[in-house]
Image (tube, rainbow, N blue to C red):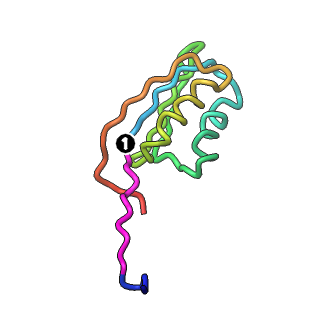
Amino acid sequence: MSRDNVSVNMPATPVVFVRFLIDADPSPGLLSRLLQPYAKRDLVPDRMWSHRAGDTMHVEIAMEAMPAEAVHLVEGNLSQVVGVRAVSRVARSCLRQVA
């Protein structure tokens, strides 16, 4: 039996819009350490924003279409970065699919 004419319907990887809001101690290597959980999964954030307010660095990292199965992994890695005090997540379903 030839498989040339058989179409396999693979389910699309579900993706979500996710934004992490992070409060951390300011330090020279903080921003690069916060990007490591994305880089090791071959993910590139769509937006990163930060500012310092006194002794706290506020950072926002957002992706328009993050694979759903990576969200809790990235969140856990972010919370383990040295100097991070708090990580909160804002997520919603997304219509865009990864290729």
Image quadrant where one finds the N terminus: bottom left
- View extreme (top): residue: 55
Q: Residue at x 70, y 31 (%)?
A: 29
> Residue sitting at 66 percent across and 37 percent down?
32
From the viewer's side, name the closer residue of 72 and 32. 72
Tell me, yes or no, whether the highlighted magenta stretch contains residue 9.
Answer: yes
Q: Kindly identify the amino acid type of the residue bearing the numbered disc 1.
A: Phe
Give the left or right position of residue 68, taking residue 35 as reference.
left
Residue at the front extreme of this rendering: 1
Magenta span contains residue 47: no
Label 1, on which residue?
17
- Tell me: 68 left or right of 76: left
**Viewer-side residue, 2 vs 99:** 2
Quarter residue 18 falls in: top left
Q: Is residue 1 left or right of residue 55?
A: left
Query: Residue 63 placed where, x, y %?
Result: 43, 44
Foreground: 29 or 40? 40
Q: Quadrant of the C terminus?
A: bottom left
Q: Is residue 86 above or below residue 2?
A: above
- How many numbered discs? 1
As drawn, 37 above or below 43: above
Kindly state the secondary structure of the residue where label 1 is placed: strand
Which region of the structure is painted magenta?
6-15
Who's the residue at 43% across and 86% down the image? Answer: 2
Q: Residue at x 49, y 33 (%)?
A: 72
